[in-house]
Image (tube, grey):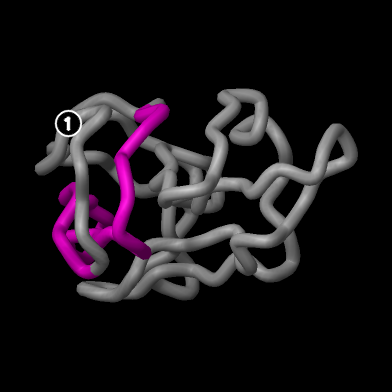
Amino acid sequence: MPALGMAQETGKVIRWLQADGARVTKGEPLLEVETDKVTVEIEAPADGTLAGIRAADGDEVPVGEAIAVVVVEGETYDPADMEKPPTAEVAAAGPRASAASTGSSQETDDRSTRRRPRVLA
């Protein structure tokens, strides 16, 4: 869940605008999120496939918790990737801004040298 304000602790998924497995383009709205002050659309951080949606419509989710990933060509998606804490390179999304990404698409984990997808957090 991206942080949309400095004091925000949670966000509510109002509705997903794209389905799990849908092809998305960078900047395309993925979902609507509501905070205590605003409702905003969160955009795709890259061209790819939306995968691993973990928050349903109506769910209240803590800021920083992974809610989905965008898998770009050449990346591998493993649901276990979403269980790991975000790296220091993760940036919070702002209103009508790109959702958080895991940083470099070349980032690796301790299990392999595969490319990791962008986590929406």
Residue drawn 21% across and 73% down?
96
The picture places residue 46, in percent across and down from the top left corner, at 35, 63
Q: Is residue 39 visible?
A: no
Residue drawn 26% across and 29% down?
21
Instruction: Provide the residue designation for mark 1.
Output: 19
Q: Does dot 1 land on a helix, a strand or a loop?
A: loop
Question: Is residue 62 left or right of 80 when viewed as pictured?
Answer: left
**Residue range (magenta):** 27-53
Question: Is residue 79 left or right of 33 when viewed as pictured?
Answer: right
Q: Is residue 72 visible?
A: yes
What crowding class fits label 1: few (fewer than 14 Cα within 10 Å), some (14-19), or many (20 or more)?
Answer: some
| Marker count (numbered) | 1
Residue drawn 50% across and 53% down?
118
Q: Nearer the viewer, residue 55 or 110?
A: 110
Q: Nearer the viewer, residue 61 or 7?
A: 61
The picture places residue 78, in percent across and down from the top left corner, at 59, 27
Question: Is residue 2 inside the magenta stretch?
Answer: no
Residue drawn 65% across and 34% down?
81
Q: Quadrant of residue 93?
A: bottom left
The picture places residue 2, in percent across and down from the top left corner, at 42, 58
* Residue 113 versus residue 42 in the image, above or below: above
Q: What kind of residue is marked 1?
A: Ala
Question: Is residue 49 inside the magenta stretch?
Answer: yes
Residue closest to the far right: 110
Q: Nearer the viewer, residue 87 or 33?
A: 87
Q: Nearer the viewer, residue 60 or 113?
A: 113
Q: Quadrant of residue 40?
A: bottom left
The picture places residue 64, in percent across and down from the top left corner, at 55, 51
* Residue 94 versus residue 12 in the image, above or below: below
